[in-house]
Structure formats: C-alpha cells, structure tokens
Image (cartoon, rainbow, N blue to C red):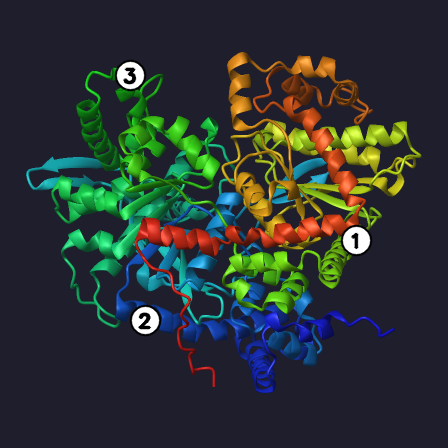
Amino acid sequence: MSKPLSDHDRKKQISVKGLAGVENVGDLKKNFNRHLHFTLVKDRNVSTKRDYYFALAHTVRDHLVGRWLRTQQSYYEKDPKRVYYLSLEFYMGRTLQNTMVNLALENACDEAMYQLGLDMEELQEMEEDAGLGNGGLGRLAACFLDSMASLGLAAYGYGIRYEFGIFNQKISNGWQVEEADDWLRYGNPWEKARPEYMRPVHFYGRTEHHPDGVKWVDTQVVLALPYDTPVPGYRNNMVNTMRLWSAKAPCDFNLKDFNVGGYIQAVLDRNLAENISRVLYPNDNFFEGKELRLKQEYFVVAATLQDIIRRFKASKFGSRDIVRTDFSTLPDKVAIQLNDTHPALAIPELMRVLVDKEKLPWDKAWDICVKTCAYTNHTVLPEALERWPIDLFQTLLPRHLEIIFEINRRHLERVSSIYPGDMDRLRRMSLIEEGGQKKVNMAHMCIVGSHAVNGVARIHSDILKATVFKDFYEMDPHKFQNKTNGITPRRWLVMCNPGLAEVIAEKIGEDFIRDLVQLKKLRDFVNDEAFIRDIAKVKQENKMKFAALLEEHYKVKINPNSMFDIQVKRIHEYKRQLLNCLHIITFYNRIKKEPNKQWTPRTIMIGGKAAPGYHTAKMIIRLITAIGEVANNDPVVGDRLKVIFLENYRVTLAEKAVPAADLSEQISTAGTEASGTGNMKFMLNGALTIGTMDGANVEMAEEAGEGNIFIFGMRVEDVDAMDAKGYNASEYYNRIPELKQAIDQIAGGFFSPKQPDLFKDIVNMLMHHDRFKVFADYEDYIKCQEKVSALYKKPKEWTKKAILNIAGSGKFSSDRTISQYAREIWGVEPTLEKLAPPDDMK
C-alpha cells in the first residue's frame, strides 16, 4: 500500500492549478524576497507570518499590473460600450487565492513557498475577508465582477469602501455578540488609491430657479476618493476594475465660516463628513430609513456618475481632450445596472447632470436616462422596500426632490392618458406615497426610470409581474425580464474544491470551468463505478478536513460518517431556521424514545448572522445554541446527533463548509426567497438539496430532475390560498403530537432549564403571528427528512444523485447570467477571446 500523498505533493499533480515551471518558480521566489526586503522593509529573521502573506500578495499582484494597464488601454483604444454595475455591497471575501487561480499561478506559488520553507495555506489564512456586504446581494455582485472580466466585458463595479464591513460575530453564552470588522487594520495590498480622480459630492443647500435653469447652491461638499481593486478574468489576461469611493472632508471644511468653535474643533469635525464611508449597514432584507444611509446612497451615485460622464467625454487613450459633447450617444456607450434600489438616485442625479449642467431639454434627457439605466429587484418582502420620507429629501437633496416630483408628474400624466379616470391606479403607481408622512417609493422610481426591470429567478420574476409590480407590467410589459442568478465556478468549485474539480477534469477536460453547461457530460458516467467511488472519496476527504476544523474550534467530537446537514445564510424568519430547529428537536425526541433503532446519524450545522437590531433573529440563534447544549451532551444520543452553530459565517467559512456538505437546507416559505445562491454552491459541490419550491430551487429541480432533489411543502398557490382562508397555527399544534411536544419543550424550558421562559417570544410568534407559516410545512418536512435519511443509508444511490446534481448545475454559472444581461439588457456581446499576455514580467 503506497502512503497517501501529502497535500503539497497532491497539489503538484492537479492540472487545474496551473503548471509550476522552473523559471516561473525561480522568479516568484526572487520577487517574494524583493518585496519582503524593499516593500515591507523586513529581514527574513524578523519576519512574521503576516509579513510573508503581504510579500506573497505583492508578488502575485505584480502579475496583475501589466494585464490591468493593458486591459484599460485596450478599452480606450477600442472605445467599447461600458457597463457600470452600481451596488452598495460587494461581498468579495479573500483575494489572494482567487487571483492565483485566475492567473494560473497557484502551483508555481505553492512550489515557490514550499522551497522557501513556508506553507501557502497558512499564509492564505492571514488574509482578512473583504466583508463589504450582508449576504446574497453583495456576494452576487462579487460573482458578477468575476464573470464580467472572464467574458471580456468592459465593466466596472462601483461601490463604497467601507472602513468597517459586516460585523464579526462571536457567540458568548449562546448569544450573538457583534464586534467591529477592522479589516483595513494592517492595510490592503489589493487596492490602489487614485487621488487624481477625487470628486466633489454635494449635500443640503437650496435651489435657485433662474431663466437659464436651476442652480443648487449653499451646499456642503464632501470629497469622494476612489480606491481601485483589480478584477482578473479567468485565464484570458483581462483585468477589470472595482472602484470603491471613500469620503474625505475638503481642506477648508468648517474653516471657511470661521466658526466660533475655533480651528481645533473644525478639524475634529472633519470626521462628520468622513463618517459617510465608515460602516456598512448590517441589515439584510430590511429597510432602515436613516439619514446616514441616504447619504451613502447619494455619495456613491454622485461620484460614480461624474466618473461615467468624464470617461464618456474623454477621447482615446492618453488624451484628455473633451471630444464628445453630444449626449444622445450616451446609451450606445454606457449601461448602468442598479443592484436593487440602493443606487436608485442615479436616475434623478443623471437627470440633474443632463438638464441643469449640460442644459439638455427634459424630454431628450429623460430618453437618454431610461435607455441607459436598468434595475434588478431582489426581494418582494414589503419591509425591505425602500421608502424615503420626503422631508429628509427636502433637507438633504432638495434639487433631487424637485426632479423626482417632475418625473412623477409626467409619469402620472402618462398613466392618466392610458387609464383615464382610474384614480386608484394613479395612487398605486405614483412615485410618491401619500399617507401619514409622504414618502418616495424608490422601486417605482427605478421602474419608471429604467428600460429593463428584472427579477433574479423565474418564479420571482413571475411574482413581480403578477403582484408587486402588476400595474407597471400591464402598462409596460416589454420592460420586464428574468435573469436567474448564478455563481462563479472559479471561486465556488476550482478554488474551494480542487479535488472535485480534478476528478471532473479527468473525465471531461478543463473547458467546463469557462463553460459550465459542459458538466452535463457527467451524466454519461453516473453508472461508472470508479467515478462514483472518486466522487464519494472527494466528499469524504472534504468532510474530514472540515470536521478537523470544527473539532478544533468547538471541542465537539464529530462523526465523519454522519450526514453533514447544513443551513447557512442570514438569520431571518422567512428563511425558517425555526423549521430546521423543529426537525432537530423531533429527531432528538425520536432517538430518545427508541435509542436502539438504527438511526441515520447527522451532524446538523446552522450558521449565519442576525442584524443587530433584529430581536427575533437573535433569539433564533439562542435557541439553536440551546438545543445544541442539550443534544450534544446527552449520552443516550451519542454521536448520532450533533448540533453546531457555525460562528461568524462569511465567504471564507462558506468556502470550507460548502465542499463538505451532504445535505443543503433551502426551506424558505414559497414565494419569499427571490432566488438564493447558496443553494447553487451546494449543488455544484455535490450536496443534495432539501427545499421548498421557492426561488431558484424550482429551476434546480428542473435541471437535476425532480427525483434527484428533495422537494416538500406548500407551493406559492397553496400559500396564497392559505392567506385567503387564514393560517391557524394551533390547528397544527393540536393535531400533530410530535409538533406539540417540540413546542411544549421550547416553551417549558426543556432547552433553557435556568430560564424556563427564555423562548416565550418565539413560541408566541409561532403560535399567534407567524407570517411564514412554519407549522404548515412541518409534517411534510419531517416526512421528507425521513426519505433523506433512508437514502443516505444507500451510499451508492446517494452518490449517483449527487453526480446528477453536479451534472445539472451548469445553468447556475454567473457566466450564463452575465451573458444574458449583456445581450438582453446592456446590448454588448460577451467573448471568450484572450488578450495577448503582457511581456513585462521578464
């Protein structure tokens, strides 16, 4: 029996990681030592692990620079239509390994570090996550950047460089505790400040109406300082740019009005202006109407539009002469995609620039605006829709409010002409919601001001047309599209699961990494004994590795042969982590009742952050940890059930959990999860899904075959019918003994003996005002979980279904999603052509 290969030796054999040429390795070592010495000013004998990480990061970054400059130069020369993806969130995670993968440098770097006596995995663990997002919406933006670069689009991601990203989550005595994410503490080797492109952004003030137009005067100015991060395409030598704005006070801030507080106070008050880019708002699917948040939204939009228009006006590379003055060609050269309504102010701001600054007539400006902008909707939950009070607008952005009123006046005029006398429709479709205090409905503004509106999964897009935006769809059906979300197979397969990528490449070659539908070819091998064995082996290795990490962190012994049952996502009532909890309790009670039965062992992991102000979500975390305390310490249960709350779930933890999962939990109430993208990551990595017919689960079932995914629960139609007749939780509670037992245990303090009424709020919610109908799906969920357990007892059949899931996951590449945006919304053509490699690395 030959001894198993070390991680290092195994990596050397993996072709998808690029070839480690001798010259390449030598150059890398030389450059690594140069950066250690000259960039970090360190000697080998006083260097820390962090120094080595920074030296490696700078070494890899060197390989980006030539490609980056060349790519941007080619855009100036060819002057293609440019795509601007505007988002308040970019949830990027770590950059080092992703860059090595996309540049085919991974094996060479690994070998170079090995020869220098360093372990690359240890160095990678030194990098901080760029956690500039909350969840799906922000991670989608990151996947889109990867795909846009890999498809050769002249695209830019624009957002905010938050000094503090999503908080770090600590679990203390079972409770979530937040701590600030000081991710820039040691510096960020991947960004380059661009002070030469600093832009002023105006707030407050008042408007003056003159015969020659409108002026916005007496404003407060904040400067927007851009930081550029390179975004490499997959092995095509293209490098696009993510530009994030940071707020700076101008030098004369608070000094020009020689305020009585004096010079020292004036300088200290600069912080007030610079607070705009201080911190990411930590709400997922919830709108909090705070002035600072509206400032952030306008800040990113105003700075970005100045950049877009400067670039539109400038001529070819190397020249600053203003050549374009005819704005009618703007939609031929610029596409602006609004990632949810957060950057909606791009619409009135573009109108302000075109009408007030460039002196275009309103109708001409409006036509340009609509042809340029497009809007992606991410949720139908009413509490998530942005509605800004008019008085806040009046104070902060008085000119924009005037423009919104004028957009609305003309919009309602059009509605009236199409539906004369329909006053109720006018009220429903207005951009201004009357009532207690008047509010601007930002979604309505986005629909009216865009030429395309899309949902993010087929069922979601259908719901938009049938309910939330029904009136708008009836009036302008041509605007509404679907663009089902996707994930990048570079990060979510090649990088996080190289073992699986290699087993696949051995069968069908490497082209699937660029063209994921090729995974369909794996269906031919579903009965290939060796292939089944290889897939199962990779999964087992991933589980062992993750189990080791968990045992170290949680001091819980994990049975690596147990089913790894994982639900990771933000904690929210609609995602129904509580339904998962009810299954755990039911499974626990069944083991206790029949301890000698052959139960399928499970390690159930739930992870995710709760918004700091969301009381119910924080209580849900406390319940999960409480259930774990009981189950994990019950000797009767033993290793047949372990419950772990995964602390501080983030991109980097997802990269470790996803490849190790057997079962993926996607159990939102039908009609509430717009798409989901975690579901796609698990599918691509060979987990089976238990889920409702919601979001992209519907399309996943279609692609994998309904028999290869565990679907349960109410469909959207059933939920609608139940809303009409009324949902009565106590009916289920009284009819289903195991449900009653579980609820009584939660309510009676079985899981919180020291505080018997700890969970009374959760029980009260479930019994009396559960918007998401947890009990209505309980029975079917439990039955479905029994089928899951039965199948897991037949490893070969389970693995065959896993293979069919991998084979069916090709549709869910963000390359497919972005190709559809490009052709059907932006009017640009993706390409798989490569740019010539730069020769400046010699």
Residue, disc 3: 424
How crowded pointer 1 is (Cα within 10 Å; few <14, some 14-19, many 20+) is rated as few
Res 247 seen here:
no
Q: Nearer the viewer, mark 3 or mark 1?
A: 3
In the image, 739 versus 477, the foreground residue is 477
Mark 2–mark 1 distance (CA, rounded to whole Å)? 49 Å
Q: Earlier in the sequence, mark 2 or mark 1?
A: 2
Mark 2–mark 3 distance (CA, rounded to whole Å)? 53 Å
In the image, 269 versus 2, the foreground residue is 2
The residue under label 1 is which amino acid type?
Glu
**The N terminus lies in quadrant:** bottom right
- Which image quarter: residue 528? bottom right
Residue, disc 2: 74
In the picture provided, is 691 more to the left or to the right than 255?
A: right
Q: Earlier in the sequence, mark 3 or mark 1?
A: 3
- Which image quarter: residue 495? bottom right
Residue, disc 1: 552
Q: Secondary structure at mark 2?
A: helix
From what the image shows, is residue 401 above or below residue 143?
above
Q: Residue at coordinates 88% horizontally, 35% vertically from top-left?
A: 634
Q: Secondary structure at mark 3?
A: helix
How crowded pointer 3 is (Cα within 10 Å; few <14, some 14-19, many 20+) is rated as few
Where's residue 82, x and y in %? 31, 58
Q: Residue at coordinates 82% horizontally, 50% vertically from top-left?
A: 561
